[in-house]
Image (tube, helix red, strand yellow):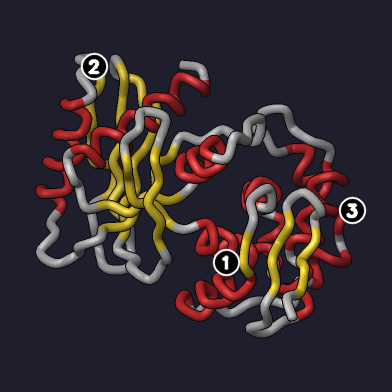
Amino acid sequence: MVMNDTLQLMHSFITSAAEQDIPLVFKGSVVLDTMLKSEGLSGLSKGTRDIDGDLRIAENVTNDKLERDIRRVISDMKDPELSVTTKRELKPGQTVSFEVSKDGTGIFSVDVGCDATRGTSVYVNAEAVEFIGVSKESMVADKAQTVSSQLVFRRIKDLFDLYALSCLPYKWEAVCQEVKNRGREFGDFSDFINHAEDIVHAYDKFKGIENKPPFEEVYLRVRDFLHLFIKGAGNICADWSPTDRVWYLNN
């Protein structure tokens, strides 16, 4: 199955889950794709075969109940060739994972955790259905923390996601609040700043990006976007301009 078909099925899964009020907060690439398309931005998609989410209500949740909910969503998609199996059961500190197959071949996974600390937003997808997903500020906070450490060499997808996220406007105060809520420790960004020549090799090997832009374009834009993170700016008032590629301070 080609990637665009898989992505469409994943969007349909989220639509069905939202219509049935399955208590999930979605995150990851499918939410980012919705976010960007709602702003008229295209050509920034990267391949994914994972739907990630967190339970909004984690009390009294069992593997059996989660599996029944996921099966109900798949059934509602009205494709007799779709099926679901449990790959990993829910345990403290871990996610439960399901594999969705079409005609016996795995096409995407659904990974569900219990992290309730992320900020959320309500999104409207292409089918005009509302669903709850993590906020853009939450995504930025998580991915900036990754890039601040040595993980930048192994998490090129987070670097590219920051490139895509930088095409949206932000208020720095909202980003700072999300960082505070998440309680994450940041690195000093030294590897990102000083070892671009090593990062480019990992970027060149990374597959699955539609219309993959040159590394220099990605790196320089992300560096500008992360400027206040790198400086260690506190709770100042600033707005990110995606067109000018700069944080404007507000007096």
Task: Say the numbered circle drawn on residue 79.
Answer: 2
Q: Residues within 10 Å of mark 1 (few under 14, many from 20)?
A: many
Task: Identify which residue is drawn at 51% across, 44% down.
Answer: 35
**Quadrant including the C terminus:** bottom right
88 to the left or right of 212: left
Residue 59 in view, yes or no: yes
Task: Identify which residue is drawn at 24% across, 15% down.
Answer: 81
Q: Where is residue 60 in the image (x, y as percent from the top left)?
A: 10, 64
15 to the left or right of 212: left
Which residue is under mark 1? 141
Q: What residue type is labelled 1?
A: Ala
Q: What residue type is labelled 2?
A: Asp
Label 3, label 1: how far apart the Cα atoms are: 24 Å
Of the residues under marks 2 and 1, which one precedes in the sequence? Answer: 2
Which residue is under mark 3? 197
Q: Do the residues labelled 3 and 2 touch (CB within 8 Å)?
A: no
Q: Where is residue 180 in the image (x, y as percent from the top left)?
A: 51, 80
| Residue, far bottom | 234
Name the secondary structure under disc 1.
helix
Towards the viewer: 242 or 159: 242
Q: What residue type is labelled 3?
A: Glu
Residue 173: which quarter of the image?
Answer: bottom right
140 to the left or right of 123: right
Query: Is 227 located above or below residue 10 in the figure?
Result: below
Residue 12: which quarter of the image?
Answer: top left
Query: Is 124 located above or below residue 6 in the figure?
Result: below
